[in-house]
Image (cartoon, rainbow, N blue to C red):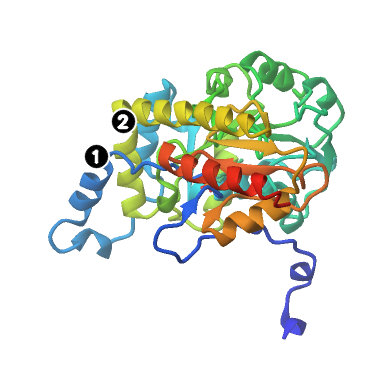
Amino acid sequence: MSRYWSDIVHRLTPYVPGEQPALAHPVKLNTNENPYPPSPHVLEAIRQELGESAEALRRYPDPTARKLRETVAAYHGIRAEQVFAGNGSDEVLAMTFQALLKHDKPIIFPDITYSFYPTYARLFEVEYRTVPVDDAFAIRVDDYAMPNGGVLLPNPNAPTGHPLSLAEIERLVKINSESVVVIDEAYVDFGAQSAIALIDRYPNLLVVQTVSKSRSLAGMRVGFAFGHPALIDALIRVKDSFNSYPLDRLAQVAATASYLDDAWFRESRAKVIASRERLTAGLTALGFEVVPSGANFVFARHPDHDAGTLAARLRDKEIFVRHFKAPRVDQHLRISVGTDAECDVLLTSLREMLRANVG
Ligand SMILES: *Cc1c(COP(=O)(O)O)cnc(C)c1O
């Protein structure tokens, strides 16, 4: 009975998350989850928080996630008042739209990027313009030198995996000193330098990160923003006007424990990067063109086969990859880096399908 809807609801274009199949053993390479379990310290911290009787769950969690923010600040060599924590970086981005990106001028972001950005723009009634990436899917920083109400881009970009250097990010921040520049670093640990190194010098820079990909904690829903305390204050004001307790107790202790186990982090990151290079070589050998990736996924097209058909036939075999029916990218597949064994299942199936001339 949509006649009861608020007016805005009619105008929304909700984000469509990748499929979470209800299968026992899918080869799931469609939502960029980490193929390895989180640090064992995470499980231990959750067990400790629960104790024998889960008594702690009776009480509300710390609304400011102070211990977590202090731990993450120490990890990055910054101060806790430069850190905001939210329920996944998607929520942090949503709060950023409300707190920092709603101005008279439209915000700008790449034409090929995280498809949640236009969704938030509609929800929060923020006008936007898109800036085309070049034919190799590279973001050209100079194209962002125009009057705007804010700049938003992932580094590395999604779904292309294309990374920008720290020098290019700094130039982007410099040429947009009149507005907030938001760098979404969901994949930064797999192949780019973090712009957190710049936040002390640029009061208009906000860096967003997540534990979902490089820390194997997508199921816990924890994300961060890093920036000047004035930017963080704006986010806190929005948070405390919406939900004082976005992070539950288990999420707070789990994420804290993850940042205290750097050996696990380095090892799992190295494994994913090595598997990405192996997957890239395997796809290239099958005739795919693969965009050089700094992320935990690759973006690939085959010149002779239809991407949508390949994705559908893979799905029949319980192998899940992401295909976007959108301009400029509808002949590409975005494939998350799984274990080498999962990547081999994918490569074997693709080899058979190409031989049988599927797509
Ligand atoms: C996965 C992803 C996010 C969301 O991460 P969560 O912290 O799990 O909400 C944000 N931005 C980009 C570009 C992503 O790919």
> Callout 2, which amino acid?
Trp
Q: Furthest-front residue in view?
A: 356
At x 74% / y 61%, what residue is drawn?
13
Q: Nearer the viewer, residue 12 or 70?
A: 12
Measured as percent of width and height from the top left, residue 351 is found at 59, 42
Instruction: Locate residue 254: give its quadrant.
Output: top left
- Earlier sequence position, callout 1 versus callout 2: 1
| The one of 295 and 54 positioned closer to us in this rendering | 295
> Where's ligand 1: which quadrant?
top right
Would you say 267 lies left or right of 218 here?
left
Circles 1 and 2: CB atoms closer than 8 Å: yes
Left or right of 83, for residue 45: left
Q: Point out the residue furthest to the top here.
A: 167
Left or right, residue 195 beside residue 167: left
- Classify mark 2: residues with Cα within 10 Å, few (<14), some (14-19) or many (20+): some
Residue 128 at x, y percent in the picture: 82, 44
